[in-house]
Image (cartoon, rainbow, N blue to C red):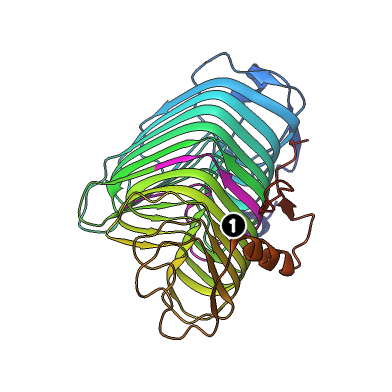
Amino acid sequence: MNKKWVLALTLLFPTLGSCSALDFTTHEISTAEDFFAMKDGRNYQLVADIDLQGQAFTPVKVKSFDGGGFAIHNFTIRESPKDEYYGLFKEAKTVSNLEIYDFQLSISANESYITVGGICGTVHDKAENLFVHDGTINVNSTYRSNLASHAYCGGVIGDLRGPGNHLRAENLRITMNSVTGGFVGGILGTGNNVELDDSSSSRNSLVCNASGASVAGVSGFGPGVSLYRVTSQDNTLVATDKGKNGSYAYGVSSSLSKSKIVASRGNSMKAMNCYGIAGSAIDSNEILSAENIFQGSKENSGLAGTMGEIQNAMSLSHSFSGAESEYGMCESVQSYVQKLAVDDVDARTDVFSAEANDLYLDRCVCGSNVEGPNCNRLEILSYVDFLSLIDSFELDPEVWEKDENTGSYRLAIEMEENK
């Protein structure tokens, strides 16, 4: 073949890894031997459940991996190479329909940027129908420099760069020790401006020890992440500052943008700064609910630190430990809040301190600035009136679940089993 044509084909079909760019075959995996024989840059289809029997292996970078609804379990990965990506797979363009459990990842790295995930370090295109449970991930990042360094770890994916759908993380134990820039999330280590739908994180223990440590129920670092029908429930979130950059715990994500139907409930958070849902909720966000336990030493905020546009939000039944500043709802609003309910929250300082429309409070212990400078409507209601108010929100019964005994509401978005 003419050398110019060879060069042109190579440029047209770039690939991950060293495999031939012209290999479009989907290779079936039915045994542990097949799995261990995988090569970089290929497409794979799992056709049976696989027990890897605790054997050591070196993960590969795949084009695509379709789990076919089967599971891979009983594996251990201990790696300390000079690499950026770590997980069952280092990298993938797409990964789908896979369950993993009974595993241990122990990663020691000395690179300025690393991503670690139970299934994949980095997914470049999309991820769907993934279930990760009953596993342990330990990350030790020792990189030291005057320049910024970042270590991201997620229970499912370290770094998701495309849409995610039906991702679940349950009963995971994740611990990260990083010199600087450590981010841990129940589902994602980071997801920059990605969309994540129908996903849940529950009963996970997530710990990050770093200068500027950040830990979240769903996405450890999520600038602009957009969520739809996502829950974070009964997770233990602990962030410890090892320098002078603070520590942060978020019930769901460090930030939200254009999100709808998001619940954070029963999460226990311990850090200098704790936020029920997100550090910032920018742009338009609708139907948020938070019920959590806060142990922040500097700041506790029932829903978020900074809000943009919020509609139909509930901040309910929190337990605050007594931080320097506490907000039953949020510290500040950049746009407006409509139809807000704050109930049974004991905040020593402000429940809210910015302009808002239709701000309702019931049974709240709060500071002198609760009304804020420009609240257009503020009402302290009896509990019966409070429940009637929530009824007037005209909430979708398929989204909100009503307790007929108490009259209170919570988001009814329990995840279905992966198929």
For the question of whether residue 261 can be seen, the reply is yes
Q: Is residue 197 visible?
A: no
Q: Is residue 60 left or right of residue 294?
A: right
Chief secondary structure of the magenta portion = strand
- Give the number of callouts: 1
Tell me the quarter of the picture where residue 70 sits: top right
Q: Amino acid at mark 1?
A: Ser
For residue 223: magenta? Answer: yes
Horizontal relation, residue 323 to residue 260: left or right: left
Figure check: 14 above or below 270: below
The foreground one among 300 and 188 is 300
Instruction: Work out which quarter of the rendered image holds the C terminus and state it.
Output: top right
Residue 135 image offset from top left, x and y in percent? 52, 27
Please state the horizontal and vertical placement of residue 133, each as a whole percent of the image: 58, 30
Q: Nearer the viewer, residue 348 or 166?
A: 348
Residue at the spot x=25%, y=57% of the render? 245
Closer to the camera, 348 or 260? Answer: 348
The residue positioned 60% from the left and 60% from the top of the image is: 383
**Residue at 27% across, 59% down:** 324
- Can you identify the residue that label 1 sits on? 289
Quadrant position of residue 346: bottom left
Determine which quarter of the picture holds residue 111.
top left
Q: Is residue 318 above or below residue 379?
A: above
Left or right? Give the position of 419 relative to 197.
Answer: right
- Which segment did they paint magenta? 213-237
| Residue 131, position as x, y percentages in the image | 65, 36
The verdict on residue 156 being magenta is no
Depicted 222 relative to depicted 121: above or below: below
Q: Position of residue 39 (x, y in %)?
A: 60, 32
Residue drawn at point x = 22 percent, y = 48 percent: 144
Other residues around mark 1 within 10 Å, as few (<14) / some (14–19) / many (≥20): many
